[in-house]
Amino acid sequence: MARKRNWAGVVQGKLTVIEEAGRDEHGNVLWLCRCECGQEVFKSNNHLNGGVKSCSASCGVAESNAARARHGMWKSKEYQCWAQMKQRCLNPNTKRYESYGGRGIKVHQPWVDSFETFLSDVGPAPKIPRASLDRIDCDGNYEPGNVRWATPREQSNNLRNNVRVEFRGKEMTLAEIAREAGIPYHQVFQRHHRGLSGEDLVTRHKTGRKPKRAMG
């Protein structure tokens, strides 16, 4: 049996403990608790010591479903991207947290609190395959002015590990240079790796030994 503690007045999660209310059939001390949802329930000393924080496992589900019903988009791309954004930045238990929240990327607080505010600021996703939520500055936060809907190509061009160089008066990734010149990416990459730049990135260069001079 858990050691008795005076829980009266303690707030734990959604529960406020009101008063001691006898014992259950196993002899555990019972406490009358009031939940934020309005329910009054009896929780044992064991439950409270175990960290129970609401009247039941289903507490709040109705409110959550009502919020979803208001916008009717909880199965949409926009809602899924919003939920995934928060997980990456706010939940240390997710696989991708280290690359986002773990390195200081934050979510604009009004977006954390409200999907509707996020949708109003960012707008609906374009009707194109695999559109995704992208930060313009990949070291910046998820916030107004730094978020857009991007195509897979735009997303890949904006990765942190992309190489960006000056080419024809613009800063471009090696992949963008290859597309503009109409040549395979690996050729541009290899030329950059050899220390070439500018038009030399898209110009074919002869390699190997110099041809022998003809004998006169």
Image (cartoon, helix red, strand yellow):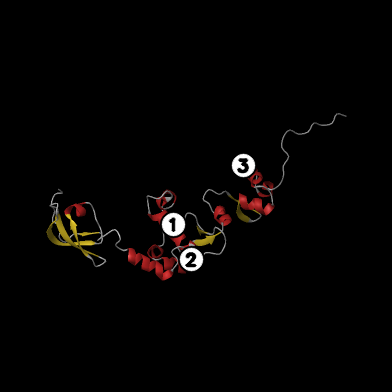
Q: Are marks 3 and 1 in contact (CB under 8 Å)?
A: no
Farthest residue, direction top: 215
| Residue at numbered disc 1 | 84
101 sits to left or right of 10: right
Front disc: 2 or 3: 2
Viewer-proximal residue, 90 or 83?
Answer: 83
The amino acid at mark 3 is His
Identify the residue shown where x is 23% and y is 61%. Answer: 15
Which of marks 1 and 2 precedes in the sequence?
1
Q: Please identify the quarter of the rendering in which residue 212 is found.
A: top right
At 15% from the left and 57% from the top, the residue drawn is 30
> Residue 91: x and y, percent?
38, 53
Q: Nearer the viewer, mark 3 or mark 1?
A: 1
Element under disc 3: helix
135 above or below 116? above
Relative depth, front residue between 129 and 136: 129
Mark 2, residue position: 122
Q: CA distance from mark 2 to mark 1?
A: 15 Å
At label 2, the amino acid type is: Val
Task: Indicate the position of residue 3 as horizontal and vertical percent values.
Answer: 14, 49
Marks 2, 1: nearer the viewer: 1
Total numbered labels placed on residues in the image: 3
Q: Which residue is more in the foreground, 201 or 91? A: 91
Tell me residue 51's x, y (percent). 24, 53
- Residue 39 at what x, y percent from top left? 23, 66
Q: CA distance from mark 2 to mark 3?
A: 38 Å
Q: Look at mark 3 in the image and give the residue it sits on.
A: 193
Q: Residues within 10 Å of mark 2 (few under 14, many from 20)?
A: some
